[in-house]
Image (cartoon, grey):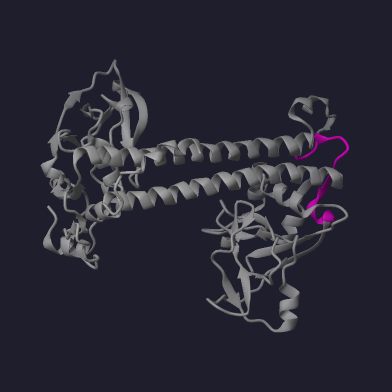
Amino acid sequence: MLGPDTVAELSADLPAAPADFRDTELNPLPVDWQLVRLGEVLAHRKEFITVRDEDEYKRCRVQVRAQGIVLRDFVRGADLTIKQQQIVRAGDFLVAEIDAKVGGFGIVPPTLDGAVVSSHYFRFEIDRKRLFEDFLGFAAMTPSFQKQVSPRGSTNYASVRPKHVMGYLIPLPPLSEQRAIARVLRTVQRAREAAERVVAATRQLKQAMLRHLFTYGPVPVDQADRVPLKETEIGPVPEHWEVLPLGNVLRQTQYGLSVRGQRSGQFPMLRMNNLTAGRLDTTDLQFVDLDPATFARYRLNRGDLLFNRTNSLELVGKTAMFDEDDPFTFASYLVRVVVDPNSVVPAYLSFYMNDQRTQARLKLLASRGVSQSNINATKLRGLVVPVPPLAEQSEIVRVLDTIDNKFATAERRCQSLLLLFQSLLHNLMTGQVRVHGLTELESIGGA
């Protein structure tokens, strides 16, 4: 049960309720909605079995951040150390004893009916005459619910117990409205999941195309077997390509500024966190003040490559091409790489440097410390790279840019649907928006 301090904290700074709303311990709610504790609509159930060594069991687990219940694995009874296991049923509200504080709870889907979990999970049966299970699943995603699971200050506790769960508060609209709210949110959620699958498929397509293009060149996949190849120290490449140390096709490598960045200043300074997935991310910048001569030495030019020479082993070697017109400088953990335009197209080299196989080779060059790894400019210049004719490099860039544009479009759709879901979750779960007139959202998955 929530104490008065926790309820007071959750209620702090709530806006005054409009005329058709009433103030509650969580937030203003429509006058025709109830505010209930879960103990009024849930019952704690225990259904244990003794596993048999010769049988196979389906285990499930909760995902954190309220991402639901998923299959964990199939396991033989003989491989289970703890022989007493709980059975869960479709539609149950399942709560992880420890992970609940990080969103480890959700509704058991029909596909996991009869799965087993350990005694460190709590199973709650829902009173379906008052509460629709999918509505509870979405209510559990709201900040007001999660604040109750992870209260701050002196009321904090190490794990969640059934008595805590029974004391959590949720809004309770009429059952028909619960179903309608859940239907709208499920529609947007499924559209987002479909968009995420497109993002994942596009990411896989890019990796497959990187492997194809850097092995066979810019030829159709069904013509790859017609390309004469030669074996090199970096693997097979077309016979007419050169394979050279990177330093042979560069005009310059230069370490960045050893100057502490500030929140404001004359010039933005790119740091290692600004290199993301082969692209520049300028949403988190620091700034420096420089005299004209120093700025001239460290000003980035369009087409420069930035190489992350010092970072964790996982992130060292990140590379991105600078494609801004505004005046930028760069910090000391980055190396500016200036290509010879007569030998290399900058974007081609950027794509090659970010290929998974190249990244794996770079990790082998890194000097490893306790928490940081380093690849100095000398080692970088010694990295062997494939050098096709410039026209083929440009065609490779065109193909990969097309895939990147599709990827960016899919990511934007994912982000838009996430923002829509979050907005609807808040507004529908507080009654600020009622479900009447929102049924057109059911077609959003095909938009």
In which quarter of the view is residue 331 placed?
bottom right
Residue 2 visible (yes or no): yes
Q: Please state if 367 lies on the left or on the right of 242 as rendered.
A: left
* Residue 341 among those drawn in magenta: no
Residue 240 in percent (x, y) is at 88, 38
* Residue 237 among those drawn in magenta: yes
As displayed, is residue 335 above or below residue 431? below
The residue closer to the viewer here, 371 or 148, is 148
Residue 106 visible (yes or no): no
Residue 391 in percent (x, y) is at 85, 45
The residue closer to the viewer here, 397 or 366, is 397
What residue is at 74 percent from the left and 29 percent from the top?
A: 221
Q: Please state if 144 lies on the left or on the right of 33 as rendered.
A: right
Number of numbered markers: 0
Residue 434 in percent (x, y) is at 29, 48
Which segment did they paint magenta?
Answer: 232-249
As displayed, is residue 310 above or below residue 136? below
Residue 157 in percent (x, y) is at 20, 55
In which quarter of the view is residue 323 placed?
bottom right
What residue is at 62 percent from the left and 43 percent from the top?
A: 406
The residue closer to the viewer here, 256 or 431, is 431
What residue is at 85 percent from the left and 57 percent from the top?
A: 341
**Name of the residue lying farthest toward the top:** 54
Q: Please state if 341 lies on the left or on the right of 317 as rendered.
A: right
In which quarter of the view is residue 13 placed?
bottom left
